[in-house]
Image: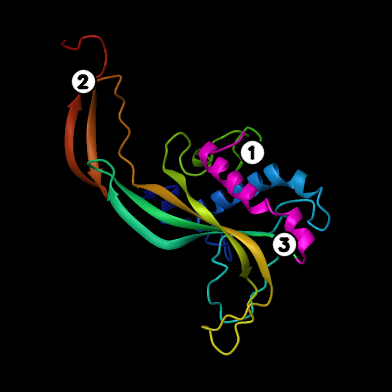
Amino acid sequence: MASTVGPQTLPLASEGQGEDLADPVAEAIADFIAWSLNYDLSAKLADLPGTGTVALPSGHVFTIDPMAKQGQRVKRPVPSLFVWWSGVESVTPWTVFQDQSLKTYNLLYVFRELPDKASTIDRSGVLAAVSRSIAYAAQAGGHPSYSYNSKPAGTMLIDSIGTLGVKDWSWRYDGGQAIQRIGIDDPNTRSLGDHKSGRDYPAFAARFTVRELVGRAEATDWTNDSLATVKNNGVEILQRYSEGIDGDESL
């Protein structure tokens, strides 16, 4: 029997040898934030010499933790965007029959180097603009010009994965912090605990709370008289007869 947790259906379907096992929430948020940063910032950044023509080039989006101890030299392109589940989750009741899972997701946007005083002044507002772009994207939840997962342009992100029209999951921006210098290509010398930065870049770190519904109650037609059955993992818990709104209700 299939079950759902947020936008993901379990058991996982086999899609062929070598197919990635991706986190649908991390991939969706990363794609929308990447699009929003390019939409909001690229035109201005193209005016600044040595900055590049886009805020986030294609192929520079990752759903991994860039600071994880990899055991080998890790080099990533800049600018780049990382979105990943932090590993923190809590489960609380949502309704009498259904729980909700609350997960913390992290984001890191790494900008290009600012090698001299002039470039630092020219780009002094970059990270503030990044924070505003992320905050607005999360608040809006979609954009008339943006589409994901082959859905029509303007479809809200939470309706682009999972069951369309059913709010399987939602996300909230919890805030972020500018980081003046961060290294994401550490040589990792001597031991995994040593971090000697090879190159340092300005960056912006942020955090999201993602709410996922665990399972889904059976659909009931409340406009007609119907028999409603509540099940848990395929086992019937209770069954009740519901009088629909058909005009003969007692006042």
Residue 35 or residue 124, whichever sits in front: 124
Most extreme residue toward the right is 49
Look at mark 3 in the image and give the residue it sits on: 112
* Magenta highlight on residue 122: yes
Q: Secondary structure at mark 3?
A: loop
Q: Earlier in the sequence, mark 1 or mark 3?
A: 3
Corner quadrant of residue 103: bottom left
Could you say whether the residue bearing mark 2 is in a helix, strand or loop? Answer: loop
Q: Amino acid at mark 3?
A: Arg
Q: Residue at x 39, y 61 (%)?
A: 88
Residue 58 visible from this viewpoint: yes
| Marked residue nearer the N-terminal end (2 or 3) | 3
Residue 167: x percent and y percent?
42, 38
Q: Residue under label 1, please give it.
A: 146
Residue density around tag 2, few if under 14, some if 14–19, many if 20 or more, within 10 Å: some
The coloring applied to the image is rainbow
Q: Residue at x 62, y 50 (%)?
A: 128
Q: Which residues are magenta?
A: 115-143
What residue appears at the point 79 percent right and 59 percent down from the top-left corner?
A: 118
Q: At label 1, which amino acid type do we have?
A: Tyr
Is residue 61 among what the camera can see?
A: no
Q: Amino acid at mark 2?
A: Glu
Q: Indicate whether 235 appears above or below 13.
A: above
Where is mark 2, residue-wise? 243
The residue positioned 64% from the left and 47% from the top of the image is 129
Q: Taking 191 as reference, is 161 above or below it?
A: above
Would you say 173 lies left or right of 133 here? left
Q: CA distance from mark 1 to mark 3?
A: 26 Å
